[in-house]
Structures are given as C-alpha cells and as structure tokens.
Amino acid sequence: MPSATAASTVQAQLDAYNAKDLEALLHTYAPDAGQFTLHGECLARGHEEMRPRFAARLSETDLHASLISRIVMGNLVTDHERVTRNFPEGRGTVEMLCIYEVADGRIQRATFAMGEQRIESAQDG
C-alpha cells in the first residue's frame, strides 16, 4: 500500500524532527535525496549536505513542527505545518508547505514553500 508507506515515512520524519533526533531524521531520507525550494533551487543533496542543515536547525531550543493538515496521493505527501523556531529576531513561527516524494520507504525529494515569519511579541510569550 504505497500511500500508507509514504504517510508513515513522512510521519517518522516529522517525529524525528520534533524529537531532534538527527540520525533518525536522516534515516527517513534516501542517501541521495534532494531538498528544494518550491521553484527549484537546491537546498541540499544527499546526507552529507543535509546533516549540517538539520544539525543547525535541531539545535534551536524552541524548535517544533505542528502538523496542520496532510494530503496523501500515492507516493506524494503534502504537509501544511506551523513551525516554531528561534529566528535571529526572536522566537516565532512560520507556516510551511512541505511536499515529499517517497520511494522504497524513504523520502527521495522534499520541496518546501515558506510563509511569512511571525515573531512573538513580549506579551505573546
């Protein structure tokens, strides 16, 4: 059942991200997987390029991705997430659209579109 496998792979990726487990996170990606912006710019290709990107992100104290919605169509999984981050300007959130292509139980390609950053004010905290 490709959809169940694709969804469970992407859920494992989200769980590893939220657990800040770098090795489990990398394991959800194929060794030669690529990460891209929505319009095609390559952010990282392969575990060697992904590792430092993930390590930097996972070091953020307040990092957490909340799933807003998920659509699964065959081996494609699209997540709409709200990510809490520690931006240079302070703690805040950003909405993301994440499109994952899964094959053989691993993410082969991930494409990301990022919404507007929202920095928390002192009264939000």
Image: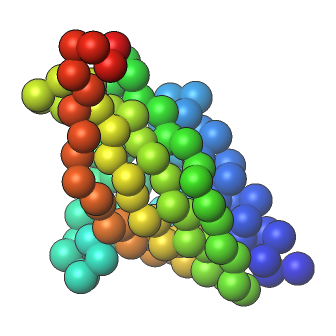
**Count of marks, rendered view:** 0
Asked if 113 appears above or below 117 in the picture, the reply is: below
Image quadrant assignment for residue 88:
top left
Asked if 50 appears above or below 103 in the picture, the reply is: above
Task: Examine the rendering and report whether any part of residue 106 can be seen.
Answer: no
Q: Nearer the viewer, residue 65 or 15?
A: 65
User: Residue 79, how many percent across, how many down?
Assistant: 55, 63
Task: Examine the rendering and report whether any part of residue 47 can be seen.
Answer: yes
Left or right relative to 125: residue 22: right
Left or right relative to 33: residue 19: right
User: Residue 40, how many percent across, how many down?
Assistant: 24, 81
Report the quarter where the C terminus lies: top left
User: Residue 17, how many percent across, how many down?
Assistant: 52, 39
Task: Look at 78% across and 77% down and name the residue there.
Answer: 3
Image quadrant assignment for residue 46:
bottom left
Q: Nearer the viewer, residue 28 or 62?
A: 62
Q: Nearer the viewer, residue 106 or 66?
A: 66
Asked if 118 appears above or below 4 in the picture, the reply is: above
Report the quarter where the N terminus lies: bottom right
Left or right relative to 47: residue 24: right
Q: Nearer the viewer, residue 60 or 29?
A: 60
Task: Look at 69% across and 76% down and name the residue there.
Answer: 72
Q: Residue furthest left?
A: 89
Task: Look at 25% across and 40% down and name the residue there.
Answer: 118
User: Residue 54, how many percent across, how many down?
Assistant: 36, 42
Task: Look at 71% across and 70% down and name the residue there.
Answer: 6
